[in-house]
Amino acid sequence: MTTTMDVELQVIGSALRAVAEEMGAILIRSAFSANIKERRDCSTAIFAPDGRMIVQAEHIPVHLGAMPEAVAAVMALDPADGEIYILNDPYTGGTHLPDITLVSRTRVGFAVSRAHHADVGGMEPASLPATSRELYQEGMIIPPTLLDERILRLLVANMRNPDERRGDLRAQIAAHRLAEARLDELCEKRSSAQVVSAMDELYAYSERRIRAGLERLPDGVYRGSGVLEPAEGELTIEVAVTVAGDQVEIDFAGTSPQHDGNLNCPLAVTRSACFFVVRCLADPDVPASGGAFAPVAVRAPEPCLVNASPPAAVVAGNTETSSRITDAVFAAFSQATDVPAQGQGTMNNTTFGNRRFTYYETIGGGQGASPHSHGPSGVHVAMSNTLNTPVEALELSYPLRVERYELRPGSGGDGAQRGGDGVLRELRVLEECRLSVLCERRRNRPRGMAGGEPGALGRTRLNGKELPPKATLQLAPGDIVLIETPGGGGWGPAPSSSD
């Protein structure tokens, strides 16, 4: 029987989710850069007074699982009501430097936003250098710091295109002021005590559902692996997944050591990737809350590729290594339950910039097929959940021309269910600028599942010449960059022609 308490919980829970969603809406609509206002490379969430994530808008998976560590770092500074703190340090609750996080104290906890800014300084425009070896080369490092007008001026003075940076940061600030007002209104209607009580129950509800989903999996130890493509050689991810009743431990012992490049991950990013996989398999429709992460323990040697120590460079770890972690963890779980074939496994990071402008985008590709359906084509896979940049918006704002943008037929792996196709995106630059590309799946194809064929490799070319997976170059007006993204793997053997 439904009780008054059940109804009230649903009402307050819906209100809290609406606050997180409205935060995201105001951030996107107020932002200056295409990366936020068009691609929606941002995330928002509401936290309880004790630092637990209660609700999150359905934004970027790699952002959201790492947010609790950012809140914990700010809580240690004892923020006052209404104060907003800013940070991007990957070793103090951040992911990589372009992802700037704001945390503000509210009447009933904390509001949090994280947005990928198109530049935060560093050795290359757009702050995604392919050749970085230390964190300092990737941009301005911001430990948890009280944000006021003086700090805002200091930060944007060290970033390219400061007017755009200031506009995006003010959009984040506006989202926080909105959250404070909406939570005040909710507390006036329902009381602070009832709102906090509802937060506890929402957290517990998500935890119960994930634990129930894990109990449906057979107990055991399952192993998976993945390969990354640095400038030279290969790096490996090794994972052992132990399912025991209603909990799971994910251990990365045996993974490659921390390396002299930027594919390293802080442990917060590794946790995000693991939480994403568990949620997909245990209960993909569970309300987005930190309770869904409570049954999951993640371990990794320190320092190693997926648990880096400062001052290791990490800019590609957040995008590329996180994508490969999900593939490795899915591969381990495939021994216990059905999982899709591998998707493109990369975000195909592409940046252009000079002193006047900075532009960043990730490019979709093929998703892997599943036992009952073909993989979708031209989508962002796993740890990315962004949109594309519309051609009209790109050409209006930047000295770039889109020559071609289309699906890449036949790039998905064959099978009883076909993998999704990648895309082809060809851009011509109209003024001198720098190019950086950070990609994967240029040497190792996305694997099929249950006898399905692998997806096609991705390719990146400059004026017809193939580039390595990671590259930073100077471009001249008229140069053409072509990105062909990988397809997804197929599921099951393809029917024979005689069938």
Image: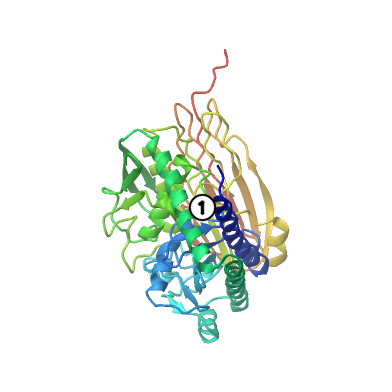
Q: Can residue 234 be seen in this view?
A: no
Q: Label 1 is placed on what type of residue? A: Ala
Q: Mark 1 points at which residue?
A: 288
User: Considering depth in this image, is 494 or 19 the residue closer to the camera?
Assistant: 19
Q: Is mark 1 on a helix, strand or loop?
A: loop
Q: Residues within 10 Å of mark 1 (few under 14, many from 20)?
A: many
Residue lying at the far bottom of the rendered structure:
150
Which quadrant of the rendered structure holds the C terminus? top right
The colour style of the image is rainbow
Residue 185's quadrant in the figure?
A: bottom right
Question: Could you tell me residue 383's position as x and y percent?
Answer: 49, 51
Question: Residue 477's image quarter?
Answer: bottom right
Mark yes or no: residue 67 visible: yes
Q: Residue at x 44, y 69 (%)?
A: 138
Q: Is residue 10 left or right of residue 255?
A: right
Q: In the image, is 329 to the left or to the right of 121?
A: left
Q: How many labels does the image show?
A: 1
Camera-nearest residue between 437 and 80: 80
Q: Nearer the viewer, residue 102 or 304?
A: 102
Residue 419 in the image: state x and y as whole percent.
55, 34
Q: Quadrant of the N terminus?
A: top right
What percent of the width, then of the height, locates residue 114? 52, 65
